[in-house]
Image: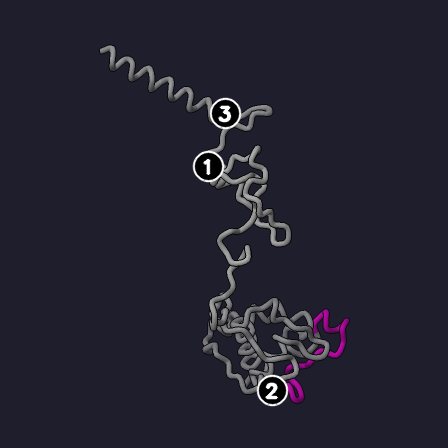
């Protein structure tokens, strides 16, 4: 009986102590569980402190090093990021390879075929993307009469002249790299989306 009562007493005191330790008020911030999870070590690329004892008098780190030590000991030359694996090529989030052609290489770009399969859904998405990125200058119907186009002037009429017969790869390249008054959009629009815009321009605006 006494043992059972003692167990209950200790359990009650433990619960009270646990709840009390969770409180924070005034200048008392309370206690953190695994503070290193919240206060991660920031690696400075240009001013790393390599002395592992720097700030030892203040340190609460779990690895036993000084509080001010911020050097990356895991990577070669204390680099914060690993170099890519040799002979590998980075891809974008949609799996596309980097677009290597330069702005002036229009003839080579014209040989590229649209890798996105044409479907009603792709055309619908292309229309939305065209409205977002292109209609301000080229107009909703592609005639170069968008509100921004009226101010800028010299915007291409996608329904007229030589623009009708432009290859899809040519249009893609101009959107990616820019040409004349049109700025490059490759940093704003992923490649897959540009190809969807190209489908919409060829199928719906130019009716080809």
Residue positioned 28% across, 13% down in the render: 5
- Under tag 2, what secondary structure? loop
Does residue 86 appear left or right of residue 164 in this picture? left
- Under tag 3, what secondary structure? loop
Does residue 43 appear left or right of residue 64 in this picture? right
**Vertical position of residue 26 compared to residue 148: above or below:** above
Discs 2/1, front: 1
Q: Image quadrant for the N terminus?
A: top left
Packing grade of label 2 (10 A; few <14, some 14-19, many >=20) is few
Q: Position of residue 158 (x, y in %)?
A: 64, 81
Discs 2/3, front: 3
**Vertical position of residue 140 compared to residue 77: above or below:** below
Which label's residue is closer to the chain start, 1 or 3? 3
Q: Are marks 2 and 1 in contact (CB under 8 Å)?
A: no
Mark identifier at residue 166: 2
- Asked if residue 156 lies in the magenta stretch, the reply is yes
Discs 1/3, front: 1
Q: Nearer the viewer, residue 51 or 151?
A: 51
Q: Are marks 2 and 3 in contact (CB under 8 Å)?
A: no
Residue positioned 61% across, 67% down in the render: 188
Q: Position of residue 15 (x, y in %)?
A: 38, 22
Which label's residue is closer to the chain start, 2 or 1? 1
Q: CA distance from mark 1 to mark 3?
A: 17 Å
Q: CA distance from mark 2 to mark 3?
A: 70 Å
| Residue under label 3 | 23
Q: Nearer the viewer, residue 140 or 197?
A: 197
Packing grade of label 1 (10 A; few <14, some 14-19, many >=20) is few
Q: Are marks 1 and 3 in contact (CB under 8 Å)?
A: no
Mark identifier at residue 3: none
Q: Give the magenta range.
A: 146-165
Residue extending furthest toward the left: 1
| Residue under label 1 | 34
């Amino acid at each position: 009986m006494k043992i059972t009562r003692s167990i209950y007493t200790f359990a009650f005191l433990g619960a009270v102590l646990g709840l009390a330790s969770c409180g924070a008020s005034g200048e008392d911030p309370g206690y953190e569980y695994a503070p290193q999870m919240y206060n991660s070590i920031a690696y400075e690329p240009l001013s790393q402190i390599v002395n592992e004892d720097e700030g030892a008098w203040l340190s609460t780190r779990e690895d036993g090093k000084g509080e001010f030590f911020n050097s990356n000991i895991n990577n070669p030359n204390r680099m914060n990021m690993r170099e890519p694996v040799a002979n590998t090529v980075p891809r974008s989030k949609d799996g596309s390879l980097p677009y290597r052609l330069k702005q002036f290489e229009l003839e080579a770009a014209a040989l590229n075929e649209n890798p996105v399969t044409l479907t009603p859904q792709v055309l619908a998405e292309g229309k939305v993307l065209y409205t977002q990125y292109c209609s301000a200058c080229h107009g909703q119907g592609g005639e170069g009469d968008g509100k921004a186009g009226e101010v800028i002037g010299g915007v291409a009429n996608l329904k007229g002249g030589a623009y009708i017969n432009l290859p899809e790869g040519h249009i893609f390249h101009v959107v990616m790299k820019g040409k004349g008054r049109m700025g490059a959009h490759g940093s704003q629009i992923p490649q897959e989306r540009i190809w969807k815009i190209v489908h919409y321009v060829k199928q719906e605006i130019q009716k080809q």
